Structures are given as C-alpha cells and as structure tokens.
C-alpha cells in the first residue's frame, strides 16, 4: 500500500509537470506566433510601401526630362524637379506602409545622388512586449524592401516597338533601312538564281496578340510584346530552297539567322533600333538634344555619322556617364567623358580616354558593335555598362543594382529629347 501511494504521488507529479510543460509550450508558441505575425506584417508593409513609392516615381519619371522654357509654358506635362519627384515617391511609400500597419517608416533613395533616381528603399520598425512574471522585455522587429524602375529584362521588352516610318516590300512592312538592305540581298540572290519571298516582317503588339491567340505556344509564336518582329528589323524569308543561300550570304547584307530552329527568321543587325544620326555640321535638322554642351556637338555629330549610331543616344549616354566631364574618373577606375575602363579602351584602340573627341568616337564605335550584337537599345546600353558577357548570359538587362538605373536614365533622357527608345520602364521589387 505504501508503494502504491508513492507511485500514485509520483504519477501525480508527472501529470502536473506535463500540464505545466504544455501550458508553457503553448505560451511560447503564442509568443512566437505573435512575433512571427508581426514580422510578416512589417515585411508586407515594407514591400507594399516600396512598390507604391516606385510606382509614383514611375508615373512622374518622364516629367524629370521635360524641357523648361523661359518664354512660354510647355503644353502637356510640366517639368518636375528632382526634389519634388523624390517627395512624390516618399509620400506614396509612407502612405502605403502606414496603411498596412507600419508604425515607424523610413524612406530613402539609394541612387538619390544621380540626376534621375530610380530606386526607393522602405524600412519599417515595429515591436511587442514579452511578459515573464512581473518583468517586461521589449522585442524589436525590423523589415526593409527596395523597389526600382527598370527596363524590361527580356530581349524584346514590352511596349510599342518601332514607331518610325515603314517601307513595304512584297506587301510586308519593315524599317526603311531594312528594306534597302533587303533590296540589295534580293538582287544578289536573283543573280544566283534564287527568288527570295518575304512571308512576314513588322508586326505590332496588337497583331502579335492575334497571332499568339491562334497559336498559343511560346516555342513557336512569341507572346505580344516579346517578338523581335515589333522592332521592324526582322524578316521571315522563303522558300525553303533559299535557306542554304541565305545561311551562306545573308551576313554580307547585315542579316543574321536569329534562331537555330527557325531557318527562315533573319534579323537586320546594322544600327539596330536606333534613331537617325545628326548632321555633321549640327545645322538645321540635327537630332542633338539641347542638353549637349556646344563644345561637344561637332564631335558627337561626326561620330554619329561615322558609325551610324543615334546622336541622341550617344549624347544621353555621355550625360549619364560623366555629365560631359572629360576628366572624370570613377571609383572603379573608368576614365574620361565616356567612362572607358583601361582594358576596354585599349581593346577598341582608344589611346587617350581623356581626349573628348577620341573618346566620343570610340564610344560610338563600341555602341555600333553592341547594337549589332544585341537587337535593342536597352541591352546594348547594359552591355556598355556591365559588359557584353553579363548581358549575353541572361539575354536581359542584368539586375545588378546599377545597370537597370543606368539604362532607365538614358532612356528617359532620350524620351525627353523626343526620341523614344521603344521600351517602357517597369516597377519591380529587388529586395
């Protein structure tokens, strides 16, 4: 009986101890769940705040590049200074974060020192108290998110594609310079007994949408906004009997077979998707934008004509690279007005990166080569900034924290100068 009472007492102690452990475990789980829920809420507030700030910046971005007239108002959107532009992003980010439960919100702009910032960062702080008996312990929760304006990452981003004049060959539309190159190639093929047929050329996004709806297989038909045909540089050619001749001869006329599995698809690579160059004398009809210092106008116009690259593209690039400072030196070691790395300068034959005229000519030379390698301006610009290998590896503008903003600023400058680059900016969460 004594042993039985002892065993019962021990069992009672075990049961009570188990109940205490269960209660304590439940309290711990409740505290963890409470903290986890607050962490999730804080992160959600930071994410939505960053996206809202970037969206407000996106909607106002073009106004940064609107020219200011001293003698007359400009119709349409008004110029917006950088401080006011950033304030729009800050207010939108704070509103969204507070609306989603955030208490303390801090908004910053990682690239705020640039002339057209594209990144916004939102930090959220929260906390809760843990009671242990009579003691209280405060636990802090922090969350952060960063969003940016960036060009679409794919090879042919969404947007309107080519928006300039079109020529017609065999009932199909294409860029005028593409048409002239096709004429030369068609004559050479005819001399060799080959008749070339154009089965498809320029297609707008709306036309591509109809085609994709009929054949919704992205292996054979690109979704709308993703087809290179939107650039006006692409030709689908036939008949099949001409494929061998095209493979051997098309490169002589600056056409390349885009995809190994599409023997009929050839793209024009000379000065892909850029605007006409400026006149060398800078006189009437020049495409040089107003922000170009007069001292560099002749060099820009001459280089644009020599290498068949848009003068506006080159000018916007110099503005973003060095603000036209011929003696600029970056922290990474890039030199001169066009910010050449020493190795790149040597490879392209640039002896003195601090000689502005030489550097501008080399810049145009390099951009001509990159525009031939990559079929869209955003990719060529990203290759200039991050290197062609990084762009070729992903077929995109690398999300490396620098290239998207660099490309966006140049596209914005080009748009403000009246030369669209055929692509729009997107808002994306990067952290």
Image (cartoon, rainbow, N blue to C red):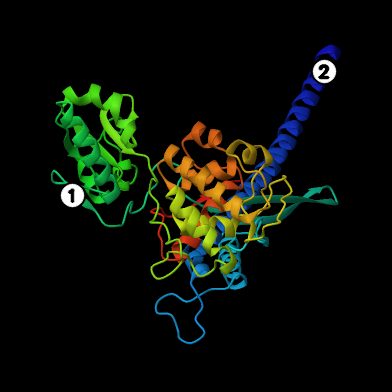
Which marked residue is nearer to the observer: mark 1 or mark 2? 1
Indicate left or right for 347 with 273 as reference.
right
Q: What residue appears at the point 30 percent right and 47 percent down from the top-left corner?
A: 230
Residue to which mark 1 is pinned:
168
- Would you say residue 262 is visible in this rendering? no
Q: Is residue 363 above or below residue 242?
A: below
Indicate left or right for 348 with 165 as reference.
right
Q: What residue appears at the point 63 percent right and 52 percent down from the top-left corner?
A: 42
Residue to which mark 2 is pinned:
5
- Would you say residue 75 is visible in this rendering? yes
Indicate left or right for 304 with 260 as reference.
right
Considering the image in quadrants, where does the N terminus appear? Answer: top right
The image quarter in which residue 73 lies: bottom left
Considering depth in this image, is 307 or 207 the residue closer to the camera?
Answer: 307
Considering depth in this image, is 193 or 290 the residue closer to the camera?
Answer: 193
Image position, residue 70 (x, y; %): 52, 84
Considering depth in this image, is 108 or 197 the residue closer to the camera?
Answer: 197
Considering depth in this image, is 362 or 415 the residue closer to the camera?
Answer: 362
Q: CA distance from mark 1 to mark 2?
A: 104 Å
Label 2: state its secondary structure: helix
Q: What residue appears at the point 33 percent right and 32 percent down from the top-left corner?
A: 252
């Amino acid at each position: 009986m004594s042993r039985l009472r002892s065993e019962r007492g021990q069992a009672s102690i075990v049961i009570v101890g188990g109940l205490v452990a269960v209660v304590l475990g439940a309290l711990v789980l409740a505290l963890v769940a409470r903290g986890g829920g607050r962490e999730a809420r804080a992160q959600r507030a930071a994410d939505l705040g960053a996206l809202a700030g970037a969206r407000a910046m996106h909607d106002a971005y073009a106004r940064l590049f609107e020219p200011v007239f001293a003698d007359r108002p400009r119709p349409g959107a008004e110029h917006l200074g950088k401080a006011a532009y950033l304030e729009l992003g800050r207010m939108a980010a704070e509103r969204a974060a507070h609306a989603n439960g955030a208490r303390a919100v801090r908004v910053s702009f990682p690239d705020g020192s640039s002339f057209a910032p594209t990144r916004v960062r939102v930090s959220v702080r929260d906390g809760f108290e843990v009671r242990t008996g009579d003691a209280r312990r405060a636990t802090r929760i922090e969350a952060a998110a960063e969003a940016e304006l960036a060009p679409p990452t794919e090879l042919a981003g969404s947007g309107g594609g080519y928006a300039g004049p079109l020529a017609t060959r065999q009932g199909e539309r294409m860029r005028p310079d593409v048409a002239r190159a096709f004429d030369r190639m068609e004559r050479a093929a005819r001399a060799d007994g080959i008749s070339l047929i154009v089965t498809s050329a320029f297609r707008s996004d709306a036309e591509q949408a109809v085609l994709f709806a009929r054949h919704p297989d992205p292996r054979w038909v690109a979704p709308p906004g993703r087809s290179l045909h939107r650039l006006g540089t692409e030709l689908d050619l036939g008949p099949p009997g001409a494929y061998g001749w095209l493979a051997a001869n098309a490169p002589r006329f600056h056409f390349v077979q885009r995809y190994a599995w599409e023997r009929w698809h050839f793209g024009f690579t000379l000065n892909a998707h850029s605007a006409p160059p400026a006149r060398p004398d800078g006189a009437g009809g020049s495409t040089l934008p107003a922000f170009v210092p007069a001292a560099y106008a002749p060099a820009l116009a001459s280089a644009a004509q020599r290498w068949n690259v848009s003068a506006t593209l080159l000018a916007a690039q110099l503005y973003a690279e060095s603000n036209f400072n011929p003696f600029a030196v970056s922290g990474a070691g890039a030199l001169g007005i066009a910010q050449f790395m020493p190795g790149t300068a040597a490879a392209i034959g640039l002896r003195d990166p601090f000689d502005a005229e030489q550097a501008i000519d080399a810049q145009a030379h390099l951009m001509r080569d990159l525009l031939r390698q990559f079929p869209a301006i955003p990719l060529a610009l990203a290759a200039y900034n991050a290197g062609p290998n990084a762009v070729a590896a992903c077929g995109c503008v690398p999300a490396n924290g620098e290239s998207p903003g660099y490309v966006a600023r140049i596209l914005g400058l080009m748009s403000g100068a009246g030369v669209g680059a055929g692509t729009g900016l997107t808002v994306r969460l990067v952290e």
